[in-house]
Amino acid sequence: MTEAEHELACGHQGKRPSAFVCKHLLSASGAGFHWGIDQQAPDALCPDAWCDACETMLRAEGAWTDRAVAAADIKMVCDLCYEKFRERNWGDDSKELKRVTKAGVTFLDKRQKKLEQQYKLTGYDRWDWNQEAGQLLFSQAGQRRLFADMVLVGSLSTRTNAWLWSWANPSTEESVKSKTREVRRYGEKHHILKLACARWRATTEQDAWEMTGAAALLIGAVGSYRTPSDNGFTFMLLTSVNWAQ
């Protein structure tokens, strides 16, 4: 299977980026969901996907043989339909998701309170962040006050109602997003959809803060920060904070 290089005119969603799935995922529920990582596009939003039955066939064959491909009967779908099929077939991961997000939010809340007491992050009239430098700068009345080393975690779009992990965002520099791949690996290992996939439907800031908390717990951070954008918010972790010289 290969990744589509063009858009698809979806009868349900209109013209959208395309993806490939096995035929079973189109109508099934709880059939399992597996994906393959293309080394030429490891951060694809919608990697090629197939169900448990196709995974069993693939393992038996040892590769995508003609027999395995015929059984999968690959179909092209749009990215939004892909996400619906993924959610419907993924399986119940709510227990582990709840555990790690609850622990992460608690961890981050304690760190954030300590950081606020020491540096008063909410008291400055200007912030600026620089991807190349990997820093968030706080200023007051035109004077630099604080420097913070940062990791960009992800973004919440209020236009599309979606969370996007920074590792899947091509506009984010690798130097400030590479650590979030640890969250992705944890999600894949423990089969937690919202931590493993690139993008998923999110409608509230609580959704985003839960992801930021989980990332803080798994990566390690002294605090976090949220900045507004044209279509939502960007969430980041702070790994160190120092007074400006």
Image: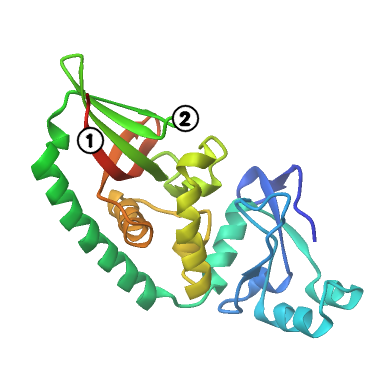
Residue designated by label 2: 132
Residue at image position (50%, 55%) is 181
Is residue 207 rendered to the left or right of residue 41? Answer: left
Q: CA distance from mark 1 to mark 2?
A: 18 Å
The quadrant in which residue 236 appears is top left
Between circles 1 and 2, the one closer to the viewer is: 1
Residue at image position (80%, 61%) is 1
Q: Position of residue 184 (x, y in %)?
A: 50, 60
Residue at image position (77%, 82%) is 57
6 up-or-down from 98: above or below? above
Q: Position of residue 5 (x, y in %)?
A: 76, 44
121 up-or-down from 25: above or below? above
Q: Secondary structure at mark 1?
A: strand
Task: Tell me the amino acid under the disc marked 2.
Answer: Glu
Is residue 148 rendered to the left or right of residue 38? Answer: left
Residue at image position (60%, 48%) is 13
Residue designated by label 1: 242
70 up-or-down from 118: above or below? below
Q: Position of residue 133 (x, y in %)?
A: 42, 30
Among numbered discs 1 and 2, the one appearing first in the sequence: 2
